[in-house]
Image (cartoon, grey):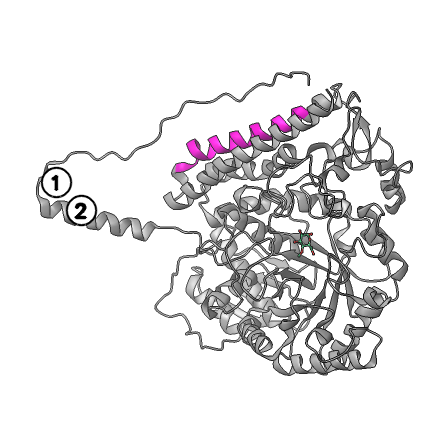
Amino acid sequence: MKNEEFATPKRKKFMHQSLKFKEKSYLCNMKQLLLSLFIMSLALTVQAEDGHQLWLRYQPVNTSHPSPLTSNPSTVDLARHELETYYTGGNVTLSIDATMPDDDGFRIDGNTIAARRDVGLLYGAYALLRRQALGAPAAASYSSHPAYALRLLNHWDNLDGTIERGYAGRSIFWPAADPQLIREYARANASLGINGTVLNNVNASPQMLTVPYLKQVQAYADILRPYGIKVFLSINFATPMALGDTKTADPLSPAVARWWKKKAHEIYKLIPDFGGFLVKANSEGQPGPGDYHRSHADGANMLADALKSATPKGQAPGIVMWRCFVYGANHKGEDRVKQAVSEFKPLDGQFRDNVILQTKNGPLDFQPREPYSPIFDQISQTPNMVELQITQEYLGQSRHLVYLAPMWKEFFSLVNPQQLKGIAGVANIGLDRNWCGHHFSQANWYAFGRLAWDPSLTSQQIAREWLALTFTSDSRFVAAASQMMEESHESCVDYMMPLGLHHIFKFDHHYGPEPDGFIASYPLEWCPVYYHKANRDSIGFNRTTTGTDAVSQYRPDMARLYNDIATCPENLLLWFHRVPWSYRMKDGSTLWQSLQYHYQRGVITVEQHQNLWHNKLRNFVDQQRWAEVDERLRDQLASAQEWRDVCLKYFSSLQQ
Ligand code: GCV
């Protein structure tokens, strides 16, 4: 290894602030001392902030006269209640306007909110409150319409209360829920325009569709309905067989189709506006139609027919969101990032009209940086929706401050948002008092919701908005903290997997580096060494036309761009190309120097963020939230250093 020198950040000396108690003569009196301590503790209690209020920190202005909420409020009741409680600008008129576009949008003219649908009035109310809190001009005329009809959270919550890839405590839904918490969850989502939620893990338990659990789902649906949120369920494809009701789960078996129809009717009886099913089939050990040599279309269509037959008249049929995250089944051995297209492209056009293909933004698995999934170039006759991961499985979990909107915007810069039918985000919500584990992870929930409504918003706009609503609108704080958020994703890529490296995580839990990872009994495509392929001379995965040819799954202009090492963006270089260590990068450095530079830059950025938060932003933030973020930033720095040191040591050892 050549020893490269890097500028280390200037470490500014700082003084730890300490509480100073000035001696005052009146404290001589013991009674007065106790009284003072009591008052001080009261003040601290009043100011205690635990993050539970999220971005909804409006102060009630009209507590004397808000319309009381019944136990079963309508959507319009909720809108009125929010406005009467929190809006300072006078009475607001809510009006249904049948001439407006038939969607969830709204128009605000002074103190009138107009919408085609009730839920539009509720969204308009939240927009008005947000604008008030952000100091937008009160009388401005403003209208807004969602980009997508489907704006969903996907919870990977198990019925025993654990959450797959959850980093904020146990499930808010299972095994049982506090109805008040579910109302708060609904309100937070409605304030962003999120209009659907999948209540259970895609690795689904067959028990989900049994009567006791469906009754629970019914109770949640009743709470969520007035907030404009429909419930959906992940299903296990083999449910009828697993519950002992059929001998097979073959989608072409009449008994199986009958079972699903009956089940769909049972669900709609309990939940008349049930949204539909999310399905992970023949992937990572889940059952599916492939077990019976049937196609994904056979499986999806059978479920789609069942939902259609059971949806109450006059209502759009329930939908099947069929996931394209499929590998290791029919195309075993093929480059993993190609397998989804190989599997689904031949089926395009064979799906019922109430089936939507749901695909992760990248072709591998929510890595810190991936190119977009070529499914979005290849599937044109079946509706597509994108699945983003809000929970930070591969981005430092809830220990690292990583703002994901810049990454999602990268996706939208290459996949036209208008070609999608909907958007889903794998939730980062749990029973932790602050919902998301890390206070700044709330920003990812917020950003997901805002982008699901309007993908043209910039990541910076959203960060500024969120900071002002969540902490303080002081422009010095917002400017510094939003810059930190904006830089955080790139720095995470730098200290984990720069220049297109991917999946060099520790096995199973995916926190921390394991570049030498290889377990013979595991599928090769779970092993880090499969992805970086580093040896003495070179590093990187040749996915060009001379390699696995994954590039050819992209539309022609992108395929050309990625295929040519001279035009391939350097931030994806090692994703698409196998490159000698001595390769000259655009700035003249060798690949090896560049790799070291990126790892070091990532660490330095975290160090700067940690210094900023610790020294400069302390006085803008309440003590509890400041300290909790501060502690995590320290952890993040240690983790970033570990990433840099372990990866560089390993790659350097190969070159000896
Ligand atoms: C829900 C990755 C994750 C799994 C997840 C899977 C999926 O493999 O590590 O936890 O399972 O993606 O999206 O189905």
* Residue at image location 66% in from the left, 65% down from the top: 204
The residue most toward the left is 29
The three-letter code of the residue at mark 1 reads: Leu
Which percent across, then down, holds residue 33?
A: 14, 45
Q: Pointer 1: residues within 10 angstroms few (<14), some, or many (20+)?
A: some
Q: Secondary structure at mark 1?
A: helix
> Magenta span covers which residues?
596-618
Give the left or right position of residue 451, taking residue 378 as reference: left
For label 1, being within 8 Å of ligand 1 is answered no
Q: Earlier in the sequence, mark 1 or mark 2?
A: 1
Give the Cα separation between the discs numbered 1 and 2. Answer: 9 Å
Disc tally is: 2
The three-letter code of the residue at mark 2 reads: Ser
Q: Which residue is mark 1?
A: 27
Residue 357 or residue 212, whichever sits in front: 212
| Dots 1, 2 in contact, CB < 8 A | yes
Q: Which residue is mark 2?
A: 36
